[in-house]
Structure formats: structure tokens, C-alpha cells
Image (cartoon, coloured by chain):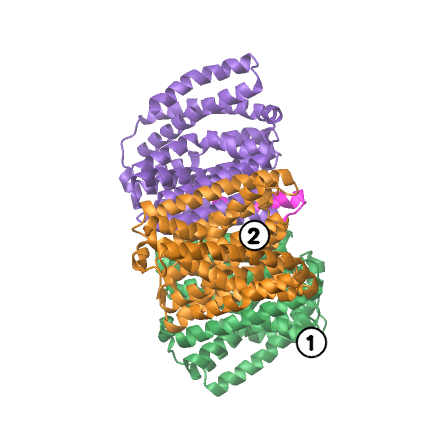
Chain colours: A purple, B orange, C green
Amino acid sequence: MQKFLSFMLIVFLPLTIIGNLMHFNEILLFGLASLTIIPLAGIMGRATESIAIHSGPRIGGLLNATFGNAVELIIAFLALRQGLTQVVQASITGSIIGNLLLVAGLSFLVGGVKYPIQKFNPSIARTNTSMMMLGVVVALVIPAIFTLQNDTIANQLSLVVAVVTLALYLLGLFFSLVTHRHVFHFTEDMEEEAEWTLRKASIILALSTLAVAYVSETLVHTIEAVSHQLGWSEVFIGVIIVAIIGNAAEHSSAVLMAWKNRMDLALEIAVGSSLQVAMFVAPVLVFVGWFFGNPLPLVFTWPELIAMTLSVLLISFLCNDGESNWLEGAMAIGAYIIVGFGFYFL
Amino acid sequence: MQKFLSFMLIVFLPLTIIGNLMHFNEILLFGLASLTIIPLAGIMGRATESIAIHSGPRIGGLLNATFGNAVELIIAFLALRQGLTQVVQASITGSIIGNLLLVAGLSFLVGGVKYPIQKFNPSIARTNTSMMMLGVVVALVIPAIFTLQNDTIANQLSLVVAVVTLALYLLGLFFSLVTHRHVFHFTEDMEEEAEWTLRKASIILALSTLAVAYVSETLVHTIEAVSHQLGWSEVFIGVIIVAIIGNAAEHSSAVLMAWKNRMDLALEIAVGSSLQVAMFVAPVLVFVGWFFGNPLPLVFTWPELIAMTLSVLLISFLCNDGESNWLEGAMAIGAYIIVGFGFYFL
Amino acid sequence: MQKFLSFMLIVFLPLTIIGNLMHFNEILLFGLASLTIIPLAGIMGRATESIAIHSGPRIGGLLNATFGNAVELIIAFLALRQGLTQVVQASITGSIIGNLLLVAGLSFLVGGVKYPIQKFNPSIARTNTSMMMLGVVVALVIPAIFTLQNDTIANQLSLVVAVVTLALYLLGLFFSLVTHRHVFHFTEDMEEEAEWTLRKASIILALSTLAVAYVSETLVHTIEAVSHQLGWSEVFIGVIIVAIIGNAAEHSSAVLMAWKNRMDLALEIAVGSSLQVAMFVAPVLVFVGWFFGNPLPLVFTWPELIAMTLSVLLISFLCNDGESNWLEGAMAIGAYIIVGFGFYFL
């Protein structure tokens, strides 16, 4: 698996650079950039993991919780700088529903084919689903409902929401890493050896971050042209395509964990990533946008809000009992297919 | 009970035929047809049950799961052929909320009067409520939100939704009849004797299906006139009146099971029927409509969507803990009364 | 605490009376009235409690369940008589979300700082959250969705909803005080001594009710002027300011109970008060309004409905497992802050 990803990187990164220099067709460039980001995201994840293990559980947990979605953050930041607010919102939406429905769904399905019933810690699952109820549903629905057609108010309320959700995200880390560390006992299992030394991992992380930023620039620049040429809306590209690319590495890790019957870890990747995007990446983007005078209002469209709300409710129903099976996985994937086609036809 | 139903049939079926021939007043005809369908639905259910017992648990489960709502399917099919798309959608809505709120509510109430607390298998209940979240809420809300005022897209997305929900319905049967049969252990209790021989049950089923089709034709033809003469909207007739008629037999069986403290069976009838309508009857109608060039878009009105979504949420809250009491029954019935008056005033 | 409240009363009640006579500035009067209502509400609560203890558990429970929100009822009644329908609806909304998010949130947070995990009876919590699903969400969403822009129908459907919810509220009392009294066993703990004799408590209750009515009159009269002068909308004042004032006494009792690890009582105050407002105060106001020819339609605005629905869902998620911790409290408070700013910017 890791060899295959390295191979992908060695092939597609140079091709993307050449393509940029030689002004390849935009659809080709978009495809090359996508195929480069998948292994890069995987390598960044592994480097962050190694640094986290060297840093001990608390700092490590903090690192994982903040750099875990660095790729989404970089893509969104570049899109925001370009003024592609809709694409940023779409990629936030896509990352949330993709992690909740597709990643969790595939994990439940693949794990469920091997084990009739898989158990996970219901306390953690409930804390996470409550957090999603707050960080995804309340935090994103309220601005859309309360600030109809008033941009100034939308931006002010978005700042309030960003401050509250980021504060709660940090309190959530304090909860899981400090005051209620014993509840999250599955972290004990994780005392694995680091893949790389701290020094090596840091260098790899720095280099791959640079590469991701470069390739993401290509991706963002070509979205508009791809949208025109293929007749796909920018929202569909943001919600479905970019989100799948940005989360491909997580998808494979979560499914692997489920296959090994380590459902707490699989869910931590799926649900934890959604939370991170909603309660860390989104607020940071609001602050960044406000700082650079290119504000990002957290005012999503109705289809986006409905898709996110239903995803949270469905996953909450599925996780509530601390058990999963293959049918629950099929349900989540079915919901993702329906929502995906919805965005395609939009 | 069964004698009373046979008596109803012997009285009202001939009267309906005579009424048709002699062109009775439409309201009278509608009433006669309704009173004929109630015992016919009961007899069809019993015949299906007998055939199911003769066929063994798997084929039998499949038969029950697909022919259990044959009356709704026939009425809806005839209405669809007449181009009464709104009536079809209304009768789907009515069947779902009627089964969820009225049938489950009466079961909880009647059983709860006898037993302070009634227990049922929470795993089955949760699987079913998750399925409803997908098959009722996601599958029906997404098309309404994503295809505003575009009929072509509405029909395409409806086809996608129909394929996905039907596939999940079949996977759900595979789950409950094959891979996780042990979870659904209450089916063991059901090894009862068949009421009729396979041959007799088949003949009864065929005859009663013909009779239902004939009487439903009368029912569907008179809806418009009844709507005009009584000042009731077609939606109200579809959601409340037709749904109560079509499900009367199920209502009485579920309540009887609750009275015998067999809550798993009572819920299977109530929640299972809702699922069947949403994930089997509705998709089949979409395919049939598409085949006959009279497409049925799964685009429900807001009141219908809200009523279905709230019903699913309320029943999920009530079933979540694997216990019921009379107050929960009263709540569900209260919700049905509010929703019913809502549709009346619409 | 009680000395401090008595002191507040002795200072602010005379000041409010003087202010009324001398026509103080409206904002000052509004402030004085608010500061007078807080201790008055506390004293009314204590007098009701004493009478309840003297009356035995059943009658006492009934008294608490009907007079517990007398202050809200009086304020709303006076506002309704003035024709301030929007303020009435806003104060109902505010009382529901304030009790659910702020009171429960503070209880979880304050109790959770002392105890890592606090347990409460999940059966009671689930009965209450199901009731809220019915009494808040179904009962208030259906009229808004089904009666768009038709006042006559809105008033008729509101009457139906009022009858159904009040009946269910009374059935709920019958359930908790009679048929399922054993489930609500925490009431046994409450066999405390009454603070005052029946006679003294009755006199105190009568006098403080008169005083509340007088001061509320001032409060209601000054709302419009405060709204104009401070630039706050009447809805914001109703939802946030009036609700906090009217519930301040309950807030402090609930938090105190949580601090003593008596979470069942804390939740009974928070969730029970919400239920009382939705299913007793609101229906009574509908009847009163109808009787006095000043009908109160239960047609709330979208922001109000969304805020109430999300509050119910969030609290249901948090209470579902019968356990709470400080992070859950922080989530509820965070949601309250977001919703509060939403109403501020509205």
C-alpha cells in the first residue's frame, strides 16, 4: 500500500510540474494534480503520526487534531485567496459528508463483511455525535437561517460562530487528552513505534506540505475550467471530487482499521475528521479570510445544510448503540450515493 | 374478528359492485369501496401469511416483505395510471406516517394499558429506525431540496433514489433473513400453523387481489368527486383516509400483538410496513411510472416531508431504548392527530 | 443566596414603584423591573414548593407542574393583552431554549467541574426528550408549515395543537404521578420539610403574584421603548432578555442541584420547565387569547422554530445515555451563545 502510494507520487508529481510548465489541458492537469495529492496526503498523515508519537500522547493528540486535515486547509486557503468562496464552502461540506457517510460507511461495510458485529466505545461515539450536532448542525444552520441576504451580519455572525466552535474544539481536546483521558482508553493501544525519527518526519512533513501547496494551487486554478468543460458545477467538484481526493488517505486508513476490527480508531478517523473540518478548519478559514480582507461567511446553501444535517443524524443513529454491522455501512454508502447524485444534478 | 371481517366483505363487496353498475353517488361509492377494502386487505394478509409459512422462513419472509403492502401498491398503481401523481405521493406519505404514528402509537397505548412497561429487541428497533432515516428522510428529502422546479432532473434523481433504496431494501432482507437471522430471533416464535393449505391460500390470494384491484379502481375514480363534494383536499384524502383504509388490517393485527405483549411483532408490522412502503412500494412505482411513460417523481411537498421526517424522529426517540409504555403511545397518537388536522386544514 | 434575593426585592420593588410614578426613563424602568422580577420569581417558586410539600406528592407535583412557570405565564398574558403577539411567541421560544441550553448547560458544566461523570435516570430523560420532540417540535413546526399566510386556519390549527398538547401534558402528569410513579423514584428523596406553613406560603404566593403582575406590566410596557432606544429587536428582548429574567431563579436552583450531584432534579427543572412552557403555558395562552378575542396563533418564525428544534435535538443527544460531563455543558452553552447572537443580529 505504502509502496504503491510512493510510486504514485514519483510518477505524478513530476508530471504535474511538467504539465504546469507546458500548459497541459486543464482537465488533464486537474487529474494529474488529484492523483498527486492522494499520495502526498498519505505521506503528510504518516509524518504527522510519527511526530505525534515522538511528542507523547498529549502534544501528539493535539498535533493529530490540528494537522490531520492540513491538505483540506491548504486547498481551502488557496481557493479562498482566489475568492472562490463557494468552492471553499463546498469543500468543507464535502469533507464533512464524505468522512461521515463514505469513510464511516466503507469502514462499517468492509469490517462488517469480516465480523458480524463490531463494537466500539459508545461514550466516545456519543460525545462525538453530540459535538457534530453542535459543530456541524447548530453552528452552520443558525448563520444560514438568521442572516438572510445581509452580508455584513453574515460575516459578523460567522466570526461569533468561528470563535465559539474553535473554543469548543479546544475544550474537546482538553476533555479527551486531559480531564477524561481514561475514557478514551483506546489511545493506550496506540503506543506503536514511530515510522520515522522526529527529524526525518519533520523534514518529510515540511517538504510534503510545500508539494501539497504547489499541487493544490494547480488543482484550484483548474477547477473553473474543468467545471466549464465537463459541465459539472463547481459545487459538485468541491463537494464530491475535491473531498474524495483530499480524504483518500484517511479513507484507506479507516477501512484498514475496520478490517482489523479496531472500530474506535476507524471512527476516530471518520467522525474525528469531520469534527476537525467543521470546528477547526472552518473557523481558521474564517479568521484567515477576515485577516486578509477576503471574508468567508459560514452561510451554506440549503442543499449543503440539508446534506450535512442528514449525514450527522444518520451517523448518530448508526453509532448510538456502540455497534456496527455491514448493513449500516451499506446504508451510509447509500445515503452518500443519493447525496452525491443530488449535487451532480444540482 | 375474522368472522366480522368476512361478514363485512360479504355485505360490502356486492354493494360496491351494484353501486358501480347503478352509478350510485360518488361519496356513497367511495364509502362502500373503503368498507370493502378493509376486509379484503385483511384476507390478503392472511393468505400471504399462510403461503409464507408453507414456504419456509426465508422465502416466507421475502413474500411478507414484498406482498405485505399489496393493497397500497395496487391503489397507488391505479392512481398513477390515472395521472393522479399527487394522490400517489399523498398515499405514500399517509401510509408511512399512519404506520409509524397511528399503528405504533395504538400498539404502545393498548399494550401499555395492560403492561406497565413492554420490552422489545432494541437492536432490531435501531436497525429499523436507521433504515427509516435513510429510506424515508434522506431518500425523500434530498430530491425535494435538490431538484427545485426542474422536472427532468426530478425524474432522473428519483430513478437514482429508487435504485438505491430498493437495493438497500433487498440488502436489508438479506441481512435479516440470512446473515443476521440470529438477531431477529423472534421469528422463531412464529412457527405457527398455516391457516390455509398452500393451494387454498394461493387461490384466495389471487381472488382477493382481483377484488382489491376492482374495488380500488372505484376508490380512485371517486376521489376527485369526494374531494369536490366534501371540500376535502385530495392530499388529505390520500394522506389520512386512503392510508387508514389501506392499513386497517395491519392496525388491528399490530394492536392485537401488542395486547399479547409481543411487541417485536407489533413493531415489525408498524415500522416494517413503513419501510416497505418507502423502500419497496415507492421505488417500484417509480419504475412502473417510468416504464409506462407516466413518471412518478419522488418530490414530495414540504408538509409531507416535514410530517414524515418528524414521524421518523419521534418514533426513533420512542423506540431507541427497547421499551414502551402507554404514554409513548399517547404521544405518537397525539402527533398523528396534529399532523392529521394539519393536512385537513391545508 | 435567599438573603441576597430578599435584599434585591426590598431595594428594587420600591424603586420600580417610584420609577413608575415619577415616569423614569424607560430603559431604567425596564432594568428595575427586571431586577425586581428575579427575586420575586424565586420567592414564588419557594412558596409554591412549600405548598406542594404540604399537599402531598400528587397534588404537590401537580401544583409544581402548573404554577412553576407562573412568572412566564403572567408576563406573556400581559403582553398578549397588549397585542404584542410577537413578544409572547419570542418569550415562549426564549424560555424553551433558555431552559434547555442555558439551564441544562450550566448544570452540566458546574456539576461536571466537580464530578467527572454525573449520572441521571435515563428513562425519565428519554420520556422527557420524547415529550419535547412532540410538544416543542411537532406541535410548533406543523402549524408553521401547514398554515402559510392564512390567519383563520392558523388560529384553528393552533387550537387543535393546544388541546392535544395540553391533554398530553396532563397525561404526562398522570403518568409520572400515578401510573409510573415508581420510575420517578427520585421524588422520594424530596421529602424535605416545607420552608413555610401552608397559610404563610399561601399568603406569600398571593402577594408575590400580585407584585409580579404589577412589575411585569412595567416590563411589558417598556419593551417597545427599550427596543427603539437600544436598537435591539423586540424578538431579541423576548427571546433572550425576558427569558433570562423570568428563569433566573430556576437557573440558580438547577445549578445548585447539579453542584450537589442531584442531576435528576437539575434536569427536572431545566427540561421540565421547557415542557411546561411548551405544553402548559403556551396552550393556556392560546385558550386565553381565544377567550378574550385576541388570538395567539402558534405560528413561530423560522429562526424561532430552528432554534427550538436544534435545542431539542442537541439536548436529546446529550441526555440520551443518562450521563453528563462538563464538555456536554460547554456544548449546550456554546449552542446558546450562537443562537443568542443569531437573535441579536436578526
Q: Amino acid at mark 2?
A: Ala
Q: Check disc 1 and report the residue beneath it.
A: C292
- Magenta part of the chain: A147-167
Viewer-side residue, C28 vs B275: B275
Q: Is the Cβ of the residue at disc 1 closer than 8 Å to that at disc 2?
A: no
Q: Is residue B45 magenta?
A: no
Q: What chain is tagged by disc 2?
A: B
**Which corner quadrant of the image does residue A152 belong to?**
top right
Viewer-side residue, B298 vs C227: B298
Viewer-side residue, B85 vs B271: B85
Can you give x and y, in whole percent of width and height, for residue B309 in the image?
53, 54
Can you give x and y, in whole percent of width and height, for residue A59 in the image?
36, 38
Tell me which residue sits at (37%, 45%) in the image.
Answer: B174
Helix, strand or loop for the magenta stretch, by majority:
helix
Q: CA distance from mark 1 to mark 2?
A: 47 Å
Can you give x and y, in whole percent of width and height, for residue B32 in the image?
58, 65
Q: Are marks 1 and 2 on the same chain?
A: no
Can residue A230 be seen at all in this image of the molecule? yes
Q: Check disc 2 and report the residue beneath it.
A: B76
Can you give x and y, in whole percent of width and height, for residue C333 in the image?
49, 55
* Secondary structure category for the residue under label 2: helix
Viewer-side residue, B324 vs C210: B324
Which is closer to the viewer, label 1 or label 2?
2
